[in-house]
């Protein structure tokens, strides 16, 4: 069940849910607007010949109040807000409709597991043929929170727990347990 604004406010007040810093106008009827932070990562294309899932990627780190995303470009960013989800709440992060309508696609792999704590790393893609200028502090996406049927037996303790700032892919740390294909 998706949490309403009333339930979100109650959970924030009780400390069961943490979203900091937050202003009341960020709480929407069924979501919380999240703001663009000041930390950005761009793949260092001068040091990367080919992207693989087995090696750590090199990124160029940027900290600034404004950033321009060139046409057809990808960048990682972070939210201002630090969140902490209880073991029975999961979240879905989506770009705001108004932002999508200017051609900026926003993801965070879409899902935030119960028990996650940290800032949200956002995946930004400019689908336009024109650059898009973004300002830190602007509402850029929203998180929809939902009750799970019961608390997770194993809440999130993965490789992005407690992340701050934009965090690049850590897929190279995955321990694949699948057998050979075919």
Image: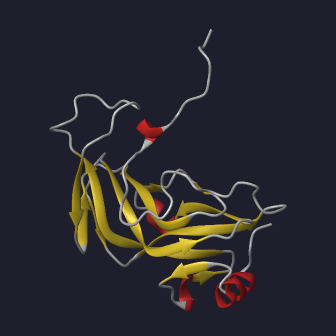
**Residue that lies at the very extreme toward the right in this rendered image:** 149
The one nearer the camera, 79 or 130, is: 79
Q: In which quarter of the image is the N terminus?
A: bottom right
Q: Can residue 72 be seen in this view?
A: yes
Q: Can residue 96 be seen in this view?
A: no
Q: Where is residue 107 in the image (x, y as percent from the top left)?
A: 49, 54
Q: Quadrant of the C terminus?
A: top right
Q: Where is residue 132 in the image (x, y as percent from the top left)?
A: 29, 61
Q: In the rendered picture of this protein, how many numbered marks are placed on residues?
A: 0
Q: Which quarter of the picture shows residue 46?
A: top left
Display colour scheme:
secondary structure
Q: Which quarter of the picture shows residue 83?
A: bottom right
The residue lying at 43 percent from left, 63 percent from top is 163
Name above or below for residue 176 compared with residue 133: above
The residue lying at 83 percent from left, 62 percent from top is 150
**Residue that lies at the very extreme toward the top in this rendered image:** 182
**Residue that lies at the very extreme toward the left in this rendered image:** 46
In this rendering, position of residue 39 left or right of residue 120:
left
The residue lying at 75 percent from left, 68 percent from top is 2
Q: Position of residue 141 (x, y in %)?
A: 50, 67
In this rendering, position of residue 1 left or right of residue 111:
right
The residue lying at 69 percent from left, 81 percent from top is 8
In this rendering, position of residue 47 left or right of residue 112:
left
């Amino acid at each position: 069940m998706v949490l309403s604004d009333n339930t979100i406010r109650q959970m924030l007040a009780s400390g069961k849910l943490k979203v900091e810093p937050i202003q009341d106008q960020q709480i929407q009827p069924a979501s919380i607007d999240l703001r663009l932070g000041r930390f950005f990562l761009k793949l260092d294309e001068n040091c990367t010949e080919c992207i693989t899932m087995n090696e750590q990627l090199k990124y160029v780190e940027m900290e600034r109040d404004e950033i321009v995303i060139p046409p057809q470009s990808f960048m990682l960013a972070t939210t201002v807000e630090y969140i902490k989800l209880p073991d029975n709440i999961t979240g879905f992060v989506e770009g705001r409709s108004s932002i999508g309508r200017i051609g900026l696609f926003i993801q965070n792999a879409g899902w935030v597991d119960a028990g996650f704590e940290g800032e949200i790393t956002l995946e930004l893609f400019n689908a336009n043929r024109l650059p898009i200028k973004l300002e830190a502090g602007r509402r850029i996406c929203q998180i929809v929170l939902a009750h799970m049927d019961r608390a997770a037996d194993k809440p999130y303790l993965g490789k992005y727990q407690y992340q701050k700032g934009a965090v690049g892919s850590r897929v190279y740390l995955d321990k694949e347990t699948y057998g050979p294909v075919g």
